[in-house]
Amino acid sequence: MGKRPIIGITMGDAAGIGPEIIVKALSKKEIYKVSSPLVIGDGKALSAECKMPFASLRIPQSIKRSIPRGIEGQNAKLKLNSINRIEEARFKFGTIDLIDLKNIKIERLKIGRINKMAARAAVDYIKKAVSLARKRKLDAIVTAPINKEGLNKAGFKFSGHTELLAHLTRTKNYAMMLVGGPLRVVLVTTHLPLNEVSRSLNKEKIYQTIELAWDNMKYFGIKKPRIGVVGLNPHAGEEGLFGKEEKEFIIPAMKKAKKKGIKVEGPIPPDTVFYRALKGEFDCVVCMYHDQGLIPLKMLAFDKGVNVTLGLPIIRTSVDHGTAYEIAGKGIANPQSLIEAIKLAAKLTKAKRV
């Protein structure tokens, strides 16, 4: 596959900011220095959103009107290279190579709104990327955001990318890692209502998450990681006074991890663990639920956070934000999270090759 890893970038929800941040990211030379990016999406949606030259493209006035003045032409130096096979890609700065699935009817696309067509199309991009990665045509995949409500309205009963990717790759043991600034957090549970978190926890699930975190830290250049495990309750339960989950599930999982030689500490009160991680005491923090880990990470690295799925047979990174319908089509979306996701995917690819 050459020196630069081939990174497949799925376009995500065409009604969101995915097309915009992809074009902005691929307008940076730095991306082409570390990777060979290949977009998997829809040519008309990508071009219409970002006003790039595209052969024989007719953009409806409704779409043109959604793009503020001044945006047209800002990407005029970029061109789309629509291909059917990866071998046709140029991987040259100034040209965006695109596998065009042609699954968006541009006249039906309303920017900034949930759209079943766009949701189904986004799933098609993911399926195509996974297929190519499983065939070793791609070294890694990077996903632009999808809308979870749109996904479910379109008939896909998954709570997000992570669960969909696990289904497509038949992966049972997986976890979501978020990387941002000085923090790395791994989640035991992901997209669950808060009142369901406690009853979804068990010793084996927590242990498997700790083990996944331990196993994957070597790809970040850390051979003997120090892992901090967060308690679920205030003061990590205070010896059962504020909850029993620590005694029933978390501590037994940690004991099992220690027997396997994993360096782990906890359960640590949620209100102190991230301060200690920032001081350098831990290389990774295992959190019990979504917001427990993402609030501190996004506070420190809101525009640069990257989502990594651990346990998959393929490398997958993603932005750490959503479709941002409220700013879609306005030309103001920040591409930095996507830029960081592409760079990290390239880094992990090289680390796994060693």
Image: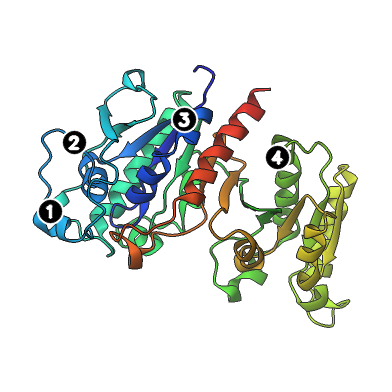
Question: As shown in the figure, which amino acid type bears the numbered disc 3?
Answer: Tyr
Task: Give how far apart the Cα atoms at labels 3 and 1 are.
Answer: 33 Å
Asked which secondary structure carries label 2, the reply is loop
Image coordinates of residue 230 in percent, x first then y, are 77, 64
Q: Residues within 10 Å of mark 3 (few under 14, many from 20)?
A: some
The earlier-in-sequence mark between 4 and 1 is 1
Q: Which numbered disc flags the more N-terminal residue, 3 or 4?
A: 3
Residue holding disc 2: 54
Q: How far apart are marks 2 and 4 (CA)?
A: 41 Å
Amino acid tagged 2: Phe
For the point 31% across and 22% down, which residue is it?
A: 85
Crowd class of label 2 (few under 14; some 14 to 19; many from 20; radius 10 Å): some
The residue singled out by tag 1 in the image is 107
Is 272 in front, or is 71?
Answer: 71
Q: Name the residue under label 3.
A: 32
Q: What residue type is labelled 4?
A: Asn
Q: How far apart are marks 4 and 1 (CA)?
A: 44 Å
